[in-house]
Image (spheres, helix red, strand yellow):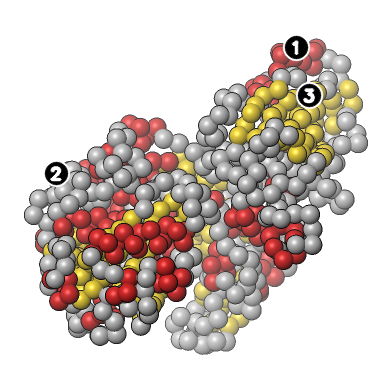
Amino acid sequence: MTATISRKAAIVGIGATEFSKDSGRTEMQLAVEAVKAALDDAGIKGADIDGMATFSMDNNWENEILRQIGGKELKFFSRTEFGGGAACGPFVHAATAISSGLCDTVVIYRALNERSGLRFGSGQLFSTSPMDPNIINFSHYFPYGFMTPAAWIAFSARRYMHEFGATSEDFGRVAVSMRDFAATNPNAFFYERPITLEEHQNSRMIADPLRLLDCCQESDGAVAFVVTTAEKAKDLANTPALIASARQSIVKDSRMMTPFYGESISGIPEFDACASDIYKMAGLSPDDIDVACLYDHFSPWVLPQLEAFGFCDRGEAKDFVKDGHISRGGKLPVNTHGGQLGEAYIHGMNGIAEAVRQIRGTSVNQVNDVNHVLVTAGAGVPTGAAILEKG
Amino acid sequence: MQQMSDIPDKLLNVSNHSLENQEGIPMSDNVSAAIREKVAHLLNRRVGPYKSWNPVSRTQVWQWCTAMGDDNPLYLDDDYRKDTEFDDVTAPPTMMQMWTMRDAQGNYPPGSTDDNPYELLKLLEDNGYGGVMAVSYDQTFHRYLTEGDQVHHYSTLVHMTDLKSTGMGKGFFVTELAEFLDQNNEKFAEANITYFQYETPKKQPGAKKPGSDVQKITRVHPVENYDNEHFWQGLRDGELLIQKCESCSTLRHPPQPMCSECQSLEWGTVAASGKGTVYTYTVMYYPEIPPFDYPNAIALIDLEEGVRIATQLTDVKPDDIKIGMEVEMTLTEVQDDMTLPLFRPVNSTK
Ligand SMILES: [Zn+2]
């Protein structure tokens, strides 16, 4: 792969609404609030936007947002499928469009009333149209009552335990670490509410081996970004977060939340497939990564991400975590905002915002001398990853 | 049904009126009197309020209508409603119990009572009457709810019979009065729900009876198309069919139109033997999705033919499930319009 998108575009604005359990307003309002905040943060006017990218699951149309933020026209807009797996795709698209000259400045947004509206964990997600690929996929599971994300993830978590001797406590340490970061983040839902491993072990079983405290929360809120050319970024006030590398990833065995048919299902083959490209495109190695914002909808799947991206060997993430490396003060702090387990579930986009803050040096849990942050999109679905670099 | 998240899940198989007109034969034994005495203080106690997390909203009405296949235009069609007395989104009356459900963490909204409305049923269960089924559900609606209404409800167990003997075994009929009120404390609906709490839990015989006005929640149906209908038809015909490439003989599941190995579109099927091993599994505890029994054991089976299939495990305790355990298929008519390939441990005694 030729890395023509590397360092050609930078995130120059981030914005968000508050994260809550009931926003009390429409997803459209959340979207425009977050986009406006990101524009203000970047010091860019709506009229200067010429591209947009978001999730196909987002319910807010580009034209509606453009009109409200004082925009004039879009030359580029794109959407990415697969729920939280879409968290990196919009950045890949933005960097591609910008580096190829299709457009200059792209707004990326994700707004959802997931908690007060349609809850993904409720088992009532999809239409019954034979045209809907979701229900065709899930028809092989729903009739058995096998219809919650936690239960689907549990299949892989159980295999991971079986193959590598991991335990529920190993998953628990991930959750404890995220909640520790959330406890000192005033924007986190679980601000000042850390948990102990014992509390994790005593939390109710949701879908064995996943306990309540292994599962991310459900949230209302929105996050938005402004991405522009590396040249333009130099003239703006914020420290640019250059997109050093970014790639999407689908493999032969990828499925929508139900990757049950590959030779091994204990890992995340999409990340195994893209990790080397992510480093190669950026000209970096795992040792260069200072902080990681990994998609943590469920704690067990943080472990194989650490392995896929080369921070430890296969099956050894449990020891890496146990040794404190992903925690406060560790050599690879993960999800310093508290993650989706601790801060909010905004489909991974709040993790990418935290990556930008770490690059800028403005995180509430700031790590020293951050130059590179790895970010990942959802696991268990077609996904993607990126490395952000201090510009 | 009522308060899905509160009541024993078996109630949600709310079936029918099969026992309604034959309230059993009275049993005048001492057990009856002893238990009645124990539970007397729990009768006629109005418990509540149970509040709602959210007001009646278009989103929730839409979700319900989609899930239930209810396309009555009164609920969501704004144009249609212009010719009616309703200005706003209108909720299906059968949603009444939805509004006051607890959240995913099991919490009632602020302002709700901490009292458990089903202490009596729990007490009966503790005394050996753990089987439970809904016998009848008589509801009365006073008005439609519209968008913005805020619901709460009260529950009163108003009646309990002596010990009766029925086809289901010995047990008690308990009747609950559920009163549903709006934000002005005006009652918009009420329901009299009779449960039969019985001694020997066993499978409900013939959980189908026409003419029932009880809203029955069933398993979600698979959606069939050209690519997968053979699979579901095969189950109806008594076989678990695996797709087989006509060109290179590779087996595949779940169904797809093209062979991943040789790109042939020509395919046939082979019937699975029904033998396999557990590749991985989970046991689902929460949320309790009706109409399933909980805990719900789900497994990914390596069929001996070489493909995997996700299914439910039966006849096994959660702690006894092991990766690698041998299992066999039992094609099971789980409801009158659905046959599924469930699996159970080999040598399990049914
Ligand atoms: Zn073939």
What amino acid is found at the position of numbered circle 2 in the picture?
Gly
Element under label 3? strand
Q: Name the residue under label 3.
A: B158
Nearest to the observer: residue B159 or residue A37: A37
Residue B86 sits in quarter: bottom right
On screen, residue A30 versus residue B268, left or right, reads left
What amino acid is found at the position of numbered circle 3 in the picture?
Val
Nearest to the observer: residue A337 or residue A265: A337
Residue B65 sits in quarter: bottom right
Residue A190 in view (yes/no) = yes
Discs 1/2, front: 2
| Chain letter for mark 2 | A
Report the disc number at residue B37: 1
Are the residues flagged by discs 1 and 2 from a single subunit?
no
Element under label 2? loop
Residue A290 sits in quarter: bottom left
Q: Name the residue under label 2.
A: A329
Q: In which quarter of the image is the C terminus of chain A?
A: bottom left
Residue at horizontal 48 percent and vertical 86 percent from the top = B263
| Chain letter for mark 1 | B
Residue at horizontal 78 percent and vertical 27 percent from the top = B174
Residue B281: percent from left, percent from top: 47, 51
Residue at horizontal 23 percent and vertical 65 percent from the top = A43
Residue at horizontal 61 percent and vertical 26 percent from the top = B116
Nearest to the observer: residue A122 or residue A322: A122
